[in-house]
Image (cartoon, coloured by chain):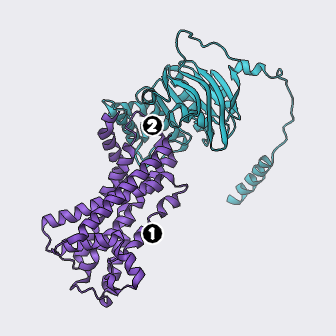
Chain colours: A cyan, B purple
Amino acid sequence: MSVPATHPAHEPAIQVRGLEKSFKDLTVLRGVDIDVARGSIFALLGSNGAGKTTMVRILSTLLKADAGTARVAGFDVATQAGDVRRSISLTGQFAAVDAILTGRENLVLVARLRHLKDPGPIADDLLRRFSLAEAGGRRVATYSGGMRRRLDIAMSLIGDPPVIFLDEPTTGLDPEGRLEVWQAVRELAAGGTTVLLTTQYLEEAEQLADRIAVLHQGRIIVNGTLAELKQLLPPARVEYVEKQPTLEDVFLSVVGARTDKENR
Amino acid sequence: MTTHFLGDTAVLLGRSLRHIARSPDTIITTAIMPIAFLLLFVYVFGGAIQTGSDSYVNYLLPGILIMTVASGISYTAYRLFLDIQGGIFDRFQSMPIARSSLLWAHVLTSLVANLISLVVVVGVALVMGFRTGASVLGWLAVAGVMVLFTLALTWLAVIPGLTAKSLDGASAFGYPLIFLPFVSSAFVPTESMPGPVRAFAEHQPVTAIVNGIRALFAQQPVGADIWTALAWCAGILVVGYTLAVLAYRRKIS
């Protein structure tokens, strides 16, 4: 299924060969190979427990693989972990923000830890880009889930790392929050950043990704563009389904009418 | 990357000190139980306790200081656990920072918070009639022992912070430590205890530390107690630090 990268002259942003990882008796990855082209959005799709988070943790140097190699931004994750960390940002499964600090303080904190010169202006700029300028002075504990995620992603952009990992960036978000995050990811890729995201939502992969790989029981079973993946299935059919009113429709119409009367 | 160690630790220390400044209740809850015991023992039980010293509050304070630190360090386990659970630990570890700086930041924060709690407790004791003729040097010696003791216990607290499976597990670890002063010379002279209990009391760290501090406050020769106390603190520090680093390595490998 593999398709040559768009810029064969360049090394891919992420290159994984024969990656294996077990936790005691549990084998999580059984030989994973992927290539992620620079500046593309790559979705790793899989159900819970498929090994997505393990992949991301190995690529972001938080976990050591048992076998195989992984190179990120040209550096080996095992032997050049420091260089890898300089080239990446990780946005973990839960918005990894400090709820006691304000949004702005979170950004300044990360800018300082990346040893950047002007943390203040960097923070203000990101607050504006992610529509958090007004909320910037408030503690993150008061933010909605979508705002936290946006702040989380904004924190990942500090220092312009060429590769960003997003582990289930929209899990637990309401539809509005999800759209906000999708928009942010698209802008990232448009700016030339390589994004590897994991998701269990097919729609998310469909909406965002240039390439999609399906991780199942520790192996990549499919890897290609959305169009390529769709060819694997029989052609689409059109079906007509009669829409019955749901119990909710009935409930709302009945209760709504009754309450109106009583209120008067 | 070790060149950034001091700078990164300072930034992360600033972060967790800000946590404390925004939830000063952690200082108050740390101080409140020792203060309650101070009040209870001085005004309720103290009259019936024969310590051979003229003022029971003078006798009691060193043990209460130990208890303050023992109750304060569980916040380190608590904060570390929350950092790990919330994912910010992973974020920091995936960044180009000196990797041990997060642990050091938490440990130093514990030191600052516990010293503030200790000052509060000493203040209450002074109001209750605690008096000492100790010189500045004597106070510095007491502070030095408390700093070493706090560092030692805090590194112990890092271990459950890194390895606990639940928040309750992370913070419950301190409870046995809080009650260690009861079976020591902190509240009553060990001579009043039956044989095996007395043997335990006289050979556990709290007694040595309490006796050492008591001697410093009373301007008496500190004798062997202070060296035993320092040896205990250094020993706990080395064991705690080693185990904490091992737990940390396991966590990030």
Residue B116: % across, % down: 28, 61
Q: Amino acid at mark 2?
A: Leu
Q: Identify which residue, A243 or A41, lies in the foreground.
A: A41
**CB under 8 Å between discs 2 and 1:** no
Counting other residues with Cα less than 10 Å from the Cα at mark 2, is it few (<14), some (14-19), or many (20 or more)? many
Q: Of helix, strand and loop, which one carries label 1?
A: helix
Q: Quadrant of the C terminus of chain A?
A: bottom right
Instruction: Name the residue rendered at 53%, 38% in the picture.
Output: A92
Q: Residue A112's quadrant in the figure?
A: top left
Q: Is residue A186 left or right of residue B220?
A: right
Residue A29: % across, % down: 65, 34
- Foreground mark, 2 or 1? 1
Classify A72 as above or below B128. above
Pointer 1 indicates a residue of which chain? B
Q: Which residue is mark 1?
A: B176
Classify A45 as above or below B164. above
Q: Of helix, strand and loop, which one carries label 2?
A: loop
Residue pushed farthest top? A9
Residue A98 appearing in the image: yes
Residue A264 appearing in the image: no
Q: Which residue is mark 2?
A: A132
Q: Amino acid at mark 1?
A: Pro
Pointer 2 indicates a residue of which chain? A
Give how far apart the Cα atoms at labels 2 and 1 are. Answer: 45 Å
Residue B2: % across, % down: 33, 35
